[in-house]
């Protein structure tokens, strides 16, 4: 069994946000398919940021371009595989990080509201 979900994220003056995710079966593989980012404030930095989450034990979920003029979307092909399938049903935290690994800020130095979206495929045992 597999299901693909769009996870919308809003970073309001903070590099951290949460989203509720529920998958109706035990998950063995999480496959990030695509990610996009829209900066909400001008002026602001233009740089790449990494999105991490406790959904995948704070490993990377996506890398996107934080652009203050245009939205940015990328094709991702990131897999997280678990030897023992896990339950996904709850509130998960998502954070943005700079390329040097330090916590990032939203587009206006922590004062803006940025949005991001991640398309994730959740696979049950033996689905890939």
Image (cartoon, rainbow, N blue to C red):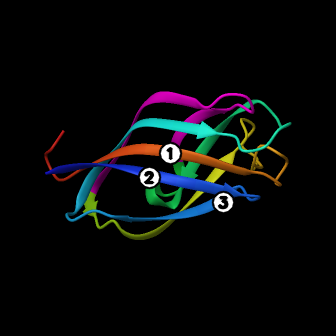
Q: Quadrant of the C terminus?
A: top left
Q: Nearer the viewer, mark 3 or mark 2?
A: 2
Q: Which residues are magenta?
A: 60-83
1 and 2 marks in contact (CB < 8 Å) = yes
**Mark sitting on residue 8:** none
Q: Which residue is mark 1?
A: 117
Element marked by disc 2: strand
Query: How far apart in space, not on screen, are marks 3 and 2 (Cα)?
Result: 14 Å
Q: Main secondary structure of the magenta part?
A: strand
Nearer the N terminus, badge 3 or badge 2?
2
The 10 Å Cα crowd at callout 1, few under 14, some 14 to 19, many 20 or more, is: some
Left or right of residue 101, residue 32 in this image: left
Q: Which residue is mark 3?
A: 16
Q: Residue at x 55, y 64 (%)?
A: 18
Percent coordinates x, y for residue 40 in the rendering? 72, 44
Residue 104 vertical position relative to residue 24 in the rendered view, above or below: above
Question: Does the stretch in magenta take in 73?
Answer: yes
Q: Which residue is mark 2?
A: 7
Q: Residue at x 53, y 30 (%)?
A: 73
Q: Residue at x 62, y 40 (%)?
A: 50
Nearer the N terminus, badge 1 or badge 2?
2
Question: Residue 71 occupies which quadrant of the picture?
Answer: top right
Percent coordinates x, y for residue 105 in the rendering? 77, 49
Left or right of residue 3, residue 18 in this image: right
Nearer the N terminus, badge 1 or badge 3?
3
The 10 Å Cα crowd at callout 3, few under 14, some 14 to 19, many 20 or more, is: many
């Amino acid at each position: 069994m597999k299901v693909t979900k769009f996870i919308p994220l809003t970073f309001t003056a903070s590099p951290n946000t949460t989203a509720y995710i529920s998958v109706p079966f035990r998950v063995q593989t999480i496959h990030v398919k695509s990610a996009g980012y829209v900066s909400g404030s001008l002026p602001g930095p233009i740089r790449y940021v990494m999105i991490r989450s406790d959904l995948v034990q704070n490993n990377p979920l996506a890398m996107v371009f934080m652009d203050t003029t245009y939205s940015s979307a990328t094709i991702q092909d990131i897999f997280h595989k678990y030897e023992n399938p896990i339950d996904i049903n709850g509130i998960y935290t998502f954070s943005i990080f700079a390329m040097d690994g330090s916590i990032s800020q939203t587009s206006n130095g922590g004062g803006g509201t940025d949005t991001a979206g991640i398309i994730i495929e959740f696979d049950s045992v033996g689905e890939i």
